[in-house]
Amino acid sequence: VGYLFAYALWYVVIYYGWLEGHIDHKGIFCVLVAAFGLAVLQTYILTPIFGVLTTEGLRFTAFTTPQYFATGLVFLLSIVIFCNSHVVTSLLAIAISSVAIILSGSRTAFMALLWLLLIFALHGIARTRVSYAALGTAWALTTGALAWLTLFSFTSGGSLSILSGTRIAELRYLPEDWGSIGTLAWRLLVYRLTLQRLQEASWHELLFGHGTSSGAEIALAFDPTRYTPTAVDANRVLHNEFLRAAYEWGLVGLVLLILLFVVIIRNALHVYAGHHASRVMVNWLLVAVLPLIVLSFLVENVLAGSGNGWGVGFLSVMVASPDIHQRAASRALPDKTRHYGTVVDATNVAATASHDSRSGGAS
């Protein structure tokens, strides 16, 4: 409950920061660069207590867990490249984020990065100007090259052998042997035990759940040598927020969580009813980060991440995307447009979007 309250509080802070102009894509770019610098400091200069586990090598991160650090960078990068019109700034942001994410070893963030670059390429090609189409093609080639270099060139004798033992390199086993992908096999066993407990639950437990943080019971039963009653973190053991909602809060909690995704997907595809026909206006920023959100809820413990990179990055996108989408829609709408049932002039839409962009545009 405390984490959910923190999410609400962070949203209010970020919303009014964006509304008043204290937070914008330029400031977010500076945060991205600063996070990379802090990660260099913490990982390679100070004692790397946040990036080292007993079962794996050094991971690149800045005073937080590597997976939250990397996924937070993906969120920040998405805002920078979809808000920014300067090619050099976008390229620099992509380069910094790509290096940081690969070194962090976060497989979730890496796959989300590839999707983000692909959607940004399609976004550029979808725009009518030739220069943007060429730029979009460049993004697509960059995405393909990054995937190939990372997944298939990490041989022990190759020039990139320094990365051959990273968690990201394990993704090359995805089509053939899931058990070779780090903690994935372990998490699948936890999911199986959770589903078994749900099958054995009473109707009352199925409807209202076993209680908040009761997921710790699963961890204690699954791996008692790793987890103890005094040391287990009940908010970070199931690694699947849908299963956690079903087990701890029952059908009621699961439905509420699914409704959250329905709202996000609805906002990603806004339908504008035109004078003669309806038109779907894609919210490119939300489409670009939607797989990251879904993946994170499927394999991470993000509800307990309100104060880390994932939580702040997620809320920043939720605040920024309506403003970015509103400005894009105002440029694309025809001269006479019915916006959600009300006929307005395109000039009025543009004026409204301009006013919203100055005041934050969140709606």
Image: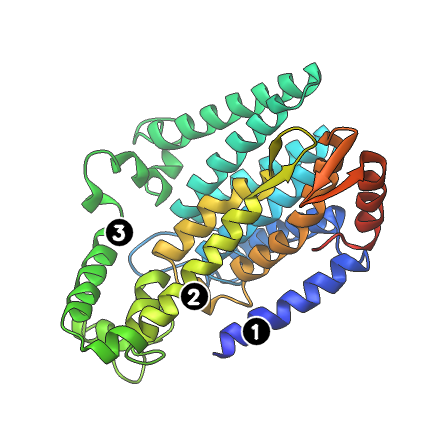
**In the picture shown, does residue 235 fall above or below 54?**
below
Circles 1 and 2: CB atoms closer than 8 Å = no
Residue 335 can be seen in this image: yes
Q: Which secondary structure, mark 1? A: helix
Disc sitting over residue 125 in the figure: none
Residue name at image x 26 percent, y 83 percent: 229
Figure quadrant of residue 8: bottom right
Above-or-below relation of 198 to 349: below
Q: How many marks?
A: 3
Single out the mark in the foreground, 1 or 3: 1
Compared to 340, does 332 lie above or below? above
Q: Which residue lies most toward the bottom here?
A: 230
Toward the viewer: 68 or 278? 278
What is the x, y in percent for residue 172? 29, 34
- Mark earlier in primary sequence (1, 2): 1
Circle 1: is it few (<14), some (14-19), or many (20+) Cα within 10 Å? some
Q: Which mark is residue 256?
A: 2
- The amino acid pointed to by label 3 is Leu
Residue 2 location (% of width, % of height):
50, 79
Q: Which circle, 3 or 2, is nearer the viewer?
A: 2
Secondary structure of residue under mark 2 = helix
321 relative position to 241: left or right: right
Seen at 37% across and 41% down, the residue is: 168
Measure the C-alpha gap from mark 1 to mark 2: 18 Å
- x, y percent for residue 194: 21, 66
Label 2 CA crowd tier, 10 Å (few <14, some 14–19, many 20+): few
C-alpha separation, residue under disc 3 versus residue under disc 2: 27 Å
Is residue 304 toward the left or the right of residue 134 in the image? left
Amino acid at the residue labelled 2: Leu
- Residue marked by disc 1: 6
Q: Which residue is mark 3?
A: 184
Q: Which amino acid is tagged 1?
A: Ala
